[in-house]
Amino acid sequence: MKNLVSNKLRDQIIKIGWICIAWSVFSVFQFFTGYQTLQDFNCDLQGVDPNLFLVGSILTGIVAGLIGGSTMVFLWEEWLRSKSYGWTLLNIIFSYTIIYILVSIFGELFVRSSQLGLTVVDRKLWMAMLSHTDEILVWQNYFVWLVVVIGTLIFLQINDKYGPGTFMAFLSGRYFKPRREERIFMFLDLRSSTTIAEKLKEIRYFSFINDVVKHATPAILNNRGEIYQYVGDEIVISWPLSSGLKNENCIKCFFDIQEALLKRSNYYENEYGTIPQYKAGLHYGFVMAGEIGVVKRDIAFSGDVLNTTSRIQEKCNE
């Protein structure tokens, strides 16, 4: 469990780091395009230190990435997974507005305190800064960064939808032509699923499966697993061989899932009258991997390894 938490935190920190880099690059791009536009229109730039504004742009991107990225990774992504999209969108815009104001204040304080030679506690500095809040450029930046934030969230959601690493594989064309890979597969299937389905009926059983998958997913991702398919109440998980063997991720994944479900045993007992348990088959070997489909494209695996893993999982009933 300690390794699971450390894996999760490390992934979140890496994600925030990439957001910081991307947003800093965009902030610098904004500076250069804005400065070039002023030069093209022959604006009077005497007394303006471009290096000061460049440093301010870099610091703004870093601060925005740290604050906004952390909020996005630790809060907004969780909202998108567990709340309705309408409620989530309104709250994201509200919290984004607060973050934008805070970051803008930081950037303005840095630039104007350097220009005017005033300290942060000086009233003249704050009056000079507030006098520019009604400028069109301020609101233009607000909407530009709102688009950047929503675009980043969409990218993260698409990456989640296809599974970590899969979306980048699509973009890079890694599986455009079939390729042979050595992979580990795990077939997870709920014990006594037919009995539970008959007891709960269709609607409640669907909610039950949805809860089980939601609670099992963090353990899968934190052990570097890639969710290949959902087949009814079954989850098919895959690892590249090196990733699955590292720290025994492919073995620990099963026990971390069981632990996650056991921790919520009171919830499942009260809500559904049963505690979910998985049985699993695990196997590895060479498979063919490639993109498949026309309207709905996906990455598919084929080979005897998958059939063997399925048969191993069926042996759990015996």
Image (cartoon, rainbow, N blue to C red):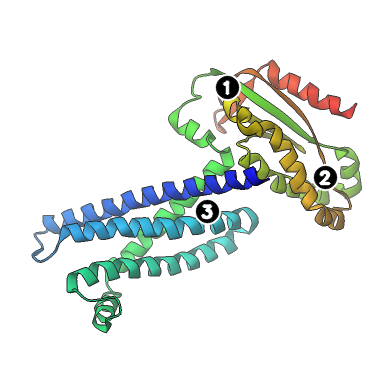
Dot label at residue 276: 2
Find numbered disc 3 in the image and state the secondary structure of the residue it sits on.
helix
Alpha-carbon neighbours of circle 2 within 10 Å: few (<14), some, or many (≥20)? many
Find numbered disc 1 in the image and state the secondary structure of the residue it sits on.
strand
Residue 10 or residue 214, whichever sits in front: 10
Find numbered disc 2 in the image and state the secondary structure of the residue it sits on.
loop
Residue 103 on image: x %, y %: 37, 65
Dot label at residue 73: 3
Tell me the amino acid under the disc marked 2.
Pro
Is residue 226 shown left or right of residue 169? right
Residue 243 on image: x %, y %: 58, 30
Relative to 171, say whether 109 is above or below: below
Does residue 225 appear in this view? yes
Measured Cα–Cα span from mark 2 to mark 3: 29 Å
Does residue 232 appear in this view? no
When asked about the image quadrant of residue 278, the answer is top right
Alpha-carbon neighbours of circle 3 within 10 Å: few (<14), some, or many (≥20)? some
Is residue 197 shown left or right of residue 141? right
Dot label at residue 289: 1
Tell me the amino acid under the disc marked 1.
Ala
Q: Residue at x 82, y 45 (%)?
A: 276
Q: Residue at x 62, y 33 (%)?
A: 247
